[in-house]
Image (tube, helix red, strand yellow):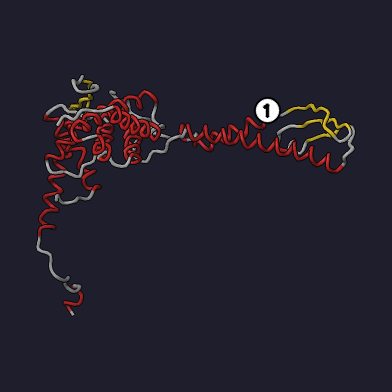
Amino acid sequence: MNRPMTLVDRLRIERVLWTVDILIYDIRTARRRTIRRELRANLRAAARDQGVGAAIRQLGPLRQLARGYVDAQYGEGALQPRWLSGAWWLFVCALVIEGLILASFSSYIAGVSAGNPGANGIYVWNQLAGIGLGTYKVWFVHGQVHSFEGTLFIGAPLIYMAAAYIIGGRLWRVVTRRRPHRSAA
Amino acid sequence: MPPSRDPQLLKGLLSPLLLRLLAERESYGYELVQSLRDQGLTEMAEGTVYPALARLEREGRISSRLVSSRTGPARKYYRTTPAGYAALAAGAADWLALAEVVTPALSRPIPDRPLPPKEEELS
């Protein structure tokens, strides 16, 4: 049977391809493009034959399909680095550092103001210097912050973020993983 | 309704089956799934077959080329390579040898209840 394909049918197929593409992100971009192209052709052939709903259903669980592609590329059960996951953990780590600095600094200011409503002079915020996050001098005039200056350290946060990327992305697998065979694709 | 089969059992046989089909005619993923279903393997899912093709290609047992289609995007057609023919011959021989042993064992009539241990029979 040769069923006509509507725009909605094509979009449904593209959604499946997008999902599979996300799930096989361990595979290199060029190879993923080849897989997507082939899967698109097969899905459209199946959709013309039996309808797009059946074509997608008969693909089975997409996670299983993606696992199959990753296993086919690197060998069954081979452990892969997770680049996107690493980037996600790097982002989370940066947010945590930022949040920690903001929370610590603002609570320090609030503490000084509350403890001495008429505070005058220089107060030093260095509560996070121990973990390498920076130090600030804050000028108080009549209990209010007049100005501040200091340094937010770069080295330690970079080390923390690199560690988050390596651990979150399991980057040691780059060294330990099996090399994929060259494909004719 | 067709009998349901153990997916793991089918997975083990999938490579020789695909190599056999591709030795007969160049074909693409969905067409191969249809061929397998036509041969009675109705529970064969596309999600199992497509990665198996990718694996066979990675192993050098099949090769591929893109062929333009009048009804959609270009299709990736596969064919069996010399290494694939060798793997097919080995896989078929293994399966036939295994079937020769397993079939008589599993074809014997199943008793209602097992016999007692041999030690009890002797005493």
- Image quadrant holding the C terminus of chain B, namely bottom left
> Vertical placement of B103 versus A81: above or below?
below
- Residue at the (27%, 37%) spot, across then down: A56
Q: Nearer the viewer, residue A28 or B46?
A: B46
Q: Nearer the viewer, residue B11 or A34?
A: A34
Quarter residue A97 falls in = top right
* Amino acid, disc 1: Ile
Q: Which residue, as the protein is rendered here, is positioned at the far bottom?
A: B123
> Vertical placement of A78 versus B111: above or below?
above
Residue tagged by mark 1?
A154
Quarter residue A161 falls in = top right
Label 1 secondary element: loop
In the displayed structure image, the side of residue A130 where residue A15 appears, left or right: left
Instruction: Residue B86 in the image: state x and y as whole percent.
Output: 17, 32
Instruction: Residue B21 in the image: state x and y as whole percent.
Output: 14, 33
- Residue at the (18%, 20%) spot, across then down: B70
Quarter residue A153 falls in = top right
In the displayed structure image, the side of residue A103 where residue A175 appears, left or right: left
In the displayed structure image, the side of residue B58 where residue A48 appears, left or right: left
Q: Nearer the viewer, residue B120 or A83?
A: A83
Chain containing the residue with disc 1: A
Instruction: Residue A76 in the image: state x and y as whole percent.
Output: 34, 39
Instruction: Residue B63 in the image: state x and y as whole percent.
Output: 22, 25
Q: Dot 1: few (<14), some (14–19), or many (≥20) neighbours within 10 Å?
A: few
- Residue at the (73%, 32%) spot, across then down: A134
In the displayed structure image, the side of residue B48 where residue A169 appears, left or right: right
- Residue at the (39%, 35%) spot, across then down: A23
